[in-house]
Image (cartoon, rainbow, N blue to C red):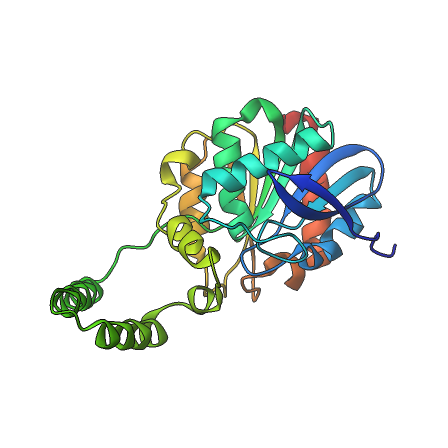
């Protein structure tokens, strides 16, 4: 199956690119930060050929969707998905998300379980690791130095220090973010999803790669323990895009889980 042509709609006040394929039970796939629906298509194509109607939106700020003109929160992205469901006239769907998309799934699964059938989480982000003592000390020293520069009106030196610190210590996703997406990224990564995970009610299956360096395996293990009805599949040798690294196996297991009436 060739990927359908992009369609465009106004969702949450922004131009949104999306595609849909297949016929049957609705499933919405949510991509990760810095990605687009294109990276979810290989999985979507296989599921769409197996009795599902699969929807893939580009999140605002990514792919072919418009960028927000103000910083967004995770709640804004959650509401975006709800607006997308309303646009498609979908009352209840299965939901799947990779990395950042998994964050959004966790919020929706906790706050709107009546709208969700089952959830698939692929290397989901959302658990903040403890910061090291050296990291905390470095951040405090940086903040103190900047406060002194601002106090003495040395704005140029403050800008140089901020740029140096970002290049030295900030994540590639932070450095790549532009405009309102940079404060959006900061808001989102600073929200810990543990309280939401404990309130997720839909049956959930987590997929992880044991070589994932972006969202390490311990996150999947902890999410499995926090979500009331969850299981964890670990693919040996797979990384952060474990669903692509083991596409055939992921498709087979995901379809079995979605079709299994005993796990409703």
Q: Quadrant of the C terminus?
A: top right
Question: Is residue 253 at least partly visible in the picture?
Answer: no
Question: Is residue 200 at least partly visible in the picture?
Answer: yes
The outermost residue toward the right is 1
Q: Is residue 16 left or right of residue 122?
A: right
Q: What residue is shown at x 22% (from left), y 62% (from top)? A: 132
> Horizontal and vertical percent for residue 75?
46, 38
> Horizontal and vertical percent for residue 140?
16, 63
Q: What residue is shown at x 48% (from left), y 68% (from top)? A: 176
Quarter-of-image position of residue 96: top right
Q: Is residue 172 left or right of residue 233?
A: left
> Horizontal and vertical percent for residue 164?
30, 77
Q: Please, is residue 156 above or below residue 264 in the view?
A: below
Q: Nearer the viewer, residue 68 or 132?
A: 68
> Horizontal and vertical percent for residue 12?
60, 38
Q: Quadrant of the N terminus?
A: bottom right
Q: Nearer the viewer, residue 241 or 208?
A: 241
């Amino acid at each position: 199956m060739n990927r359908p042509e992009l369609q465009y709609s106004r969702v949450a006040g922004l131009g949104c690119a999306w595609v849909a394929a297949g016929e049957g039970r609705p499933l919405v796939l949510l991509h990760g930060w810095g990605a687009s629906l294109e990276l979810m298509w290989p999985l979507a194509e296989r599921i769409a050929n197996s009795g599902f109607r699969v929807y893939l939106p580009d999140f605002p700020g990514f792919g072919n969707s418009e960028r927000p003109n103000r910083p967004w929160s995770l709640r804004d992205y959650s509401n975006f998905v709800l607006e997308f469901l309303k646009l498609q006239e979908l009352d209840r769907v299965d939901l799947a998300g990779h990395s950042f998309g998994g964050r959004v799934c966790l919020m929706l699964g906790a706050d709107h379980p009546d709208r969700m059938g089952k959830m698939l989480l692929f290397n989901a982000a959302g658990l903040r690791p403890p910061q090291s003592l050296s990291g905390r000390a470095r951040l405090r020293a940086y903040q103190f130095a900047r406060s002194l520069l601002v106090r003495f009106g040395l704005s140029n030196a403050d800008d140089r220090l901020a740029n140096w610190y970002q290049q030295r210590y900030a994540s590639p996703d932070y450095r790549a973010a532009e405009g309102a997406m940079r404060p959006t990224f900061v808001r989102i990564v600073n929200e810990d999803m543990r309280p939401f995970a404990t309130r997720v009610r839909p049956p959930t299956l987590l997929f992880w790669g044991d070589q994932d360096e972006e969202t390490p395996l311990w996150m999947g293990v902890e999410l499995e323990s926090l979500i009331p009805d969850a299981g964890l599949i670990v693919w040996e040798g797979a990384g952060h895009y474990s669903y692509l690294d083991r596409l055939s196996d992921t498709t087979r297991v995901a379809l079995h889980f979605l079709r299994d009436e005993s796990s409703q």
